[in-house]
Amino acid sequence: TTTATDAAGNTSPASTAVSFVVDTVAPGAPAIVSITDDVAPGTGTLGSGSSTNDPRPQLTGTAEAGSTVTIYDNGIAIVTAVVGSKGSWSFTPSVNLSEGSHQLTVRATDVAGNTGPASPVFTVTVDVTAPQTPSGFIINDDTGVLKGAIGAGQFTDASEPRLTGRGEPGSTITVYDNGVVIGTTTVLPNGTWSITPTSPLAEGAHSITLRETDAAGNQSGLSQPINFTVDLTPPDMPVATLNSAGTQITGTAEPGSKIDNTTNAGLQTGAATADSNGNYVVNLNPAQTNGEIISVVASDAAGNQSSPALVNAADITPPAAPGNLVVAEDGASVSGTAEPNS
């Protein structure tokens, strides 16, 4: 309170009391707790070190109640906000943050004007650029007789083909089959990825497409499809007839199937492809004229193989002359070598 005394010594009544607090203690360091991304598809709360496709993410944090926080982006003050009575604050930028890394810090200044230390750095990377649309990926058939890349329009006996490709490290590859998600995988630091469907593909037509989503939530366009057919059913056993000269096998099999012939000695004697009506002709080289058993197998475009049809070649080849003949001393017997079972 105060009083006034005039020159004659008269003193006034005391003034109304004025109360105040001397505060020389700076607030403690505030904190940026999280940022909130509300730009689809990757919305939600993010921690320090995250990436976001939201150029205006909401920042929330804590500080001394009633103080004013100053928010710094890469060391430059960009805005102030008043801390609520419960010690929390939030801020949403009024202009877009630039693409790239942002080192965010906060300082609190109390009502007495004391400014405290900076908060720990909260790092966020703004990324609003979508990844490139996936291309050049490969669908691999690792099973059965026919292995390798499955091309557009081809058949395969692989119900769980392995997909491989390249992308932006850390991004997510989503695989669609006929428009339905069948698996996701993360691109490795070296830019490669690999995935096998979570469930076997059913027999029939399939159309595989891909989409890439980066760590910030930006999505690429949908890739061009690779269309192929899964065929797990082997052809029926072919019908096979060997001519009397042992030079030709004719018969019927699944149209378009490949016909292979192998003797019981493991000799490949010829091959052919069944025509659109299923008819085929295999010319044998060499001719089979010595009682051979020939296995005839049909393989379809997917690599499935039929059970073998067995045909017996006639034995019209005379045995070779006996050799290594030895006559016993008494002349009663002769020993030597000849064709087995002759």
Image: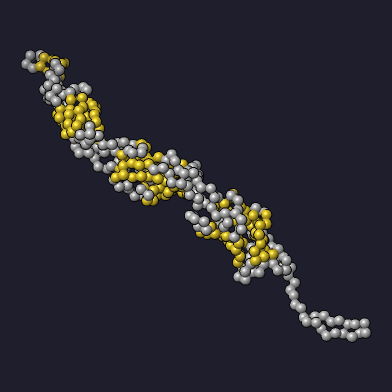
Instruction: Looking at the picture, tell me which residue is in the foreground, 277 or 322.
Output: 277
Residue at image coords 37%, 41% = 226
Q: Place residue 67 in its image quadrant.
A: bottom right
Residue at image coords 37%, 45% = 208
Q: Place residue 337 in its image quadrant.
A: top left
Quadrant occupied by the N terminus: bottom right
Residue at image coords 33%, 39% = 153
Q: Position of residue 146 (x, y in %)?
A: 31, 36
Quadrant occupied by the C terminus: top left
Residue with the most extreme right position: 8
Q: Is residue 207 visible?
A: yes
Q: Position of residue 12 (x, y in %)?
A: 85, 84
Against 79, residue 12 (above or below) is below
Instruction: Looking at the picture, tell me which residue is in the foreground, 150 or 39.
Output: 39
Please state the total of marks drawn on the protein image. 0
Instruction: Looking at the picture, tell me which residue is in the foreground, 328 or 86.
Output: 86
Against 197, residue 328 (above or below) is above
Residue with the most extreme left position: 332
Residue at image coords 20%, 39% = 236
Q: Is residue 28 visible?
A: no
Q: Place residue 338 in its image quadrant.
A: top left
Q: Position of residue 25 (x, y in %)?
A: 72, 67
Q: Is residue 293 left or right of residue 118?
A: left
Instruction: Looking at the picture, tell me which residue is in the foreground, 17 or 211.
Output: 211
Q: Position of residue 99 (x, y in %)?
A: 58, 49
